Amino acid sequence: MSHRRSYAPPASEHPNVTLLRDGYTAFAKGDIDFIRGLLADQVVHRVPGRGPLCGEYRTPEEILGFYVRLFELSGGTFRTEPYAVMADDANGVALVQTYAERPGKVLDSRAVDVFRLDHGRITEIRTLAEDQYTDDDFWS
């Protein structure tokens, strides 16, 4: 007799899961205004590593500029697609597949985006690449 459990999704998602999913959808569409509305005025996006895009982006405008730079450097090919999103009232995590192309290079890897949330706004993002060396090399 098999004791396999089937997974039944919850009847409804936490509102912050929906918020994060909507943010990734807006990112894929290039909807900068929607993304701007998700970011708190006192927000920081931390991108660890040693590549030219690594560092801390400390305002909504700096963060949006970082996103534009990802598209510019990849000739518009950069995309990040969440395959799992979890959240509660103050924290969120998205497991994402990232893809981009540059002359002679392809990035096809996974990352984790960790979020801090406050009253429906993102106050902190930390992007952790699965293979930081590969990520740094791609953007260099």
Image: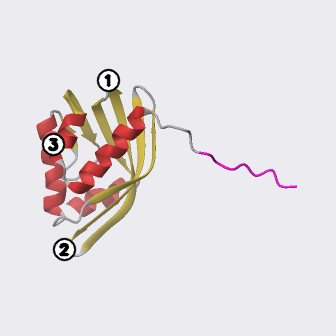
Q: Residue at x 32, y 44 (%)?
A: 22
Q: Does 104 appear above or below 23?
A: below
**Is residue 23 inside the magenta stretch?**
no
Q: Nearer the viewer, mark 2 or mark 3?
A: 3
Q: Nearer the viewer, mark 2 or mark 1?
A: 1
Check disc 2 and give the amino acid type: Pro
Check disc 1 and give the amino acid type: His
Q: Position of residue 118 (x, y in %)?
A: 32, 24
Q: Position of residue 49 (x, y in %)?
A: 28, 47
Q: Which residue is mark 3?
A: 33
Q: Residues within 10 Å of mark 2 (few under 14, many from 20)?
A: few
Residue nearest the observer in this picture, 3 or 48: 3
Q: Earlier in the sequence, mark 2 or mark 1?
A: 2
Q: Is residue 59 left or right of residue 105?
A: left
Residue nearest the observer in this picture, 130 or 41: 41
SS at circle 3: helix
Image quarter of the C terminus: bottom left
Image quarter of the N terminus: bottom right
| Res 117 → quadrant | top left
Q: Position of residue 32 (x, y in %)?
A: 16, 46
What range is drawn magenta here?
A: 1-8
Mark seen at residue 5 = none
SS at circle 1: loop
Q: Residues within 10 Å of mark 3 (few under 14, many from 20)?
A: few
Q: Which residue is mark 2?
A: 103
